[in-house]
Amino acid sequence: MPSTIPPLHTDFLKRVRAEVVRDTRLNALLAGGSYIHGGFDQHSDLDFVVVVEDDKYSEVMASRHDFAQRVGDLLAAFTGEHVGEPRLLICLYGPSLIHVDLKFVRSADMGSLIERPAVLFARDPEHIQARLDAAAIAWPNLAPEWFEQRAWVWLHYGATKLMRGELFEALGILAFFREQVLGPMLHRRMGRPQRGVRRMELLSDEASRTLARTVATHDAMSVRAALLAAIDMYVDLRSDDVPREMVRGMPEALVSYLDESISATK
């Protein structure tokens, strides 16, 4: 549990807990994210897991928007299919504005977890603790081969957009590459769970400065320099845990391709 919780978050946590206690279809309320990882502040989201009675699960899932409305002044809400989690309801409340994630699960779903959540309420604490004790808890870190097979495809895609003059597209793929590849690999280097570029500026000045070289402006030469920096950074980070099989011809072939962009702009 965080040592201090901002008043807005404290008030909201109490309201969610009270609603779970009131609704007998719900067995427990758990909290994850920054609440357990540290760094919780006034800008943090609230990440809740609501454990539902097995035979009431379909009913609760069909009415979860109503639950979200009961706990506060709901401004907007949508489900989490885009992050591969349809059980998740992503909510914005306000004013004051606060982001809240509500994931609805059954007890049986707790066998495999990415983190051990804090128990905020449980009708049967011993049962919930036993479920958590028995769960396989592992952050979904990605293997070196996952990065290697994707890195060069995505970097080449960015280079083609540069060559065509679609700089907004190229800027977008650079941001995507930082989130999906460079950030996770930097976290791996620091011995942390691979969490995109989360809190990078707070974790390492050196990593932040290096990553900043991959941020470009809407200018062809700036985009080219950022792509080359991304290539160099990936190759360096790859050396921490070398994939079993490298993509043939890289990075030389991609650097050569980017050299063509210089000729094309002259």
Image (tube, rainbow, N blue to C red):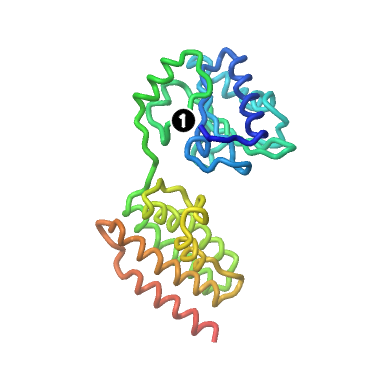
The residue located at (36%, 37%) in the rendering is 138
Asked if residue 7 is positioned above or below residue 242 in the image, the reply reads above
- The part of the image, by quadrant, that contains residue 130 is top left
Is residue 192 rendered to the left or right of residue 52? left
Would you place residue 37 above or below residue 50 in this image?
Answer: below
Residue at position x 49%, y 54% from top? 200
Q: Percent x, y for residue 120?
A: 53, 24
The relative height of residue 79 versus residue 188 in the rendered view (above or below) is: above
> What x and y, as percent, mark residue 21?
59, 16
How many numbered badges does the structure rendering display? 1
- Taking the view exactly as shown, the residue that stands out farthest to the right is 95
Q: Nearer the viewer, residue 142 or 13?
A: 13
| x and y percentages locating residue 91 in the rendered image | 64, 35
The amino acid pointed to by label 1 is: Pro
What residue is disc 1 on?
Answer: 117
Q: Residues within 10 Å of mark 1 (few under 14, many from 20)?
A: many
| Screen quadrant of the C terminus | bottom right
Judged from the image, the secondary structure of the residue bearing numbered disc 1 is loop
